């Protein structure tokens, strides 16, 4: 089961944090198809958020086809994301790297900035192709 951690200081909406944490658990293989998400009541008791916020997050996950609500039974995972299991050797290497970064005196924000810069190099954001230039019918070009 997933334990949601809400950070009220990030400026990120609470329901978005729930969606993001669920997706992360799906990517890491911590949640698998058929697994049951905690009930809205359980999330409310653990995080002190409004029940409607939890339901909004679960509806968003359902809209994306990641979970399905079964009346009277709960909300269940429909499909996983990615292929980076929590026990991946790459995770161990990343853990070691993070340890070295901490020992080198880097703050969390420094590590995040550095990691994001490397990600951007290897996984550039897809930018839409520019719209084709309009030509008039009488244009000789």
Image (tube, rainbow, N blue to C red):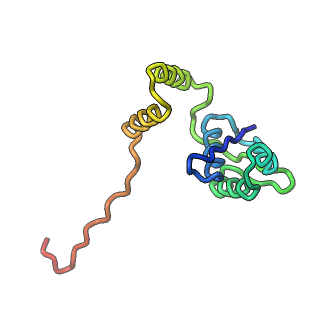
Quadrant in the picture for residue 30:
top right
Residue at the spot 65% in from the left edge and 34% down from the top edge: 29
Quadrant in the picture for residue 64:
bottom right
- Residue 6: give x, y in percent of width and height: 66, 44
Relative placement, left or right, of 19 versus 2 is left
34 or 108, nearer to the observer: 108
Residue furthest left in the image: 140
Residue at the spot 57% in from the left edge and 33% down from the top edge: 84
Residue at the spot 36% in from the left edge and 38% down from the top edge: 121
100 or 69, nearer to the observer: 100
- Residue 112: give x, y in percent of width and height: 47, 35
Up-down: is 129 above or below 105?
A: below
Residue furthest right in the image: 72
- Residue 105: give x, y in percent of width and height: 45, 23
Give the total of numbered labels: 0
Quadrant in the picture for residue 133:
bottom left
Up-down: is 132 above or below 109?
A: below
Screen quadrant of the C terminus: bottom left
Screen quadrant of the N terminus: top right
Up-down: is 55 above or below 81?
A: below
- Residue 73: give x, y in percent of width and height: 85, 51
Relative placement, left or right, of 97 versus 13 is left
Up-down: is 133 above or below 109?
A: below
Relative placement, left or right, of 136 versus 115 is left
Relative placement, left or right, of 33 versus 64 is right
120 or 31, nearer to the observer: 120
């Amino acid at each position: 089961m997933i334990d949601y951690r809400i950070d009220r200081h990030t400026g990120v909406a609470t329901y978005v944090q729930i969606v993001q944490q669920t997706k992360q658990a799906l990517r890491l293989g911590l949640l698998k198809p058929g697994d049951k998400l905690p009930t809205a009541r359980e999330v409310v008791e653990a995080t002190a958020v409004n029940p409607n916020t939890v339901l909004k997050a679960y509806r968003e996950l359902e809209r994306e086809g990641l979970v399905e609500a079964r009346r009277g039974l709960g909300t269940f995972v429909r499909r996983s994301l990615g292929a980076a299991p929590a026990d991946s050797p790459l995770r161990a290497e990343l853990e070691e790297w993070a340890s070295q970064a901490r020992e080198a005196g880097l703050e969390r924000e420094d590590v995040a900035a550095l990691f994001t810069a490397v990600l951007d190099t290897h996984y550039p954001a897809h930018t839409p192709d520019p719209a084709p230039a309009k030509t008039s019918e009488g244009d000789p070009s």
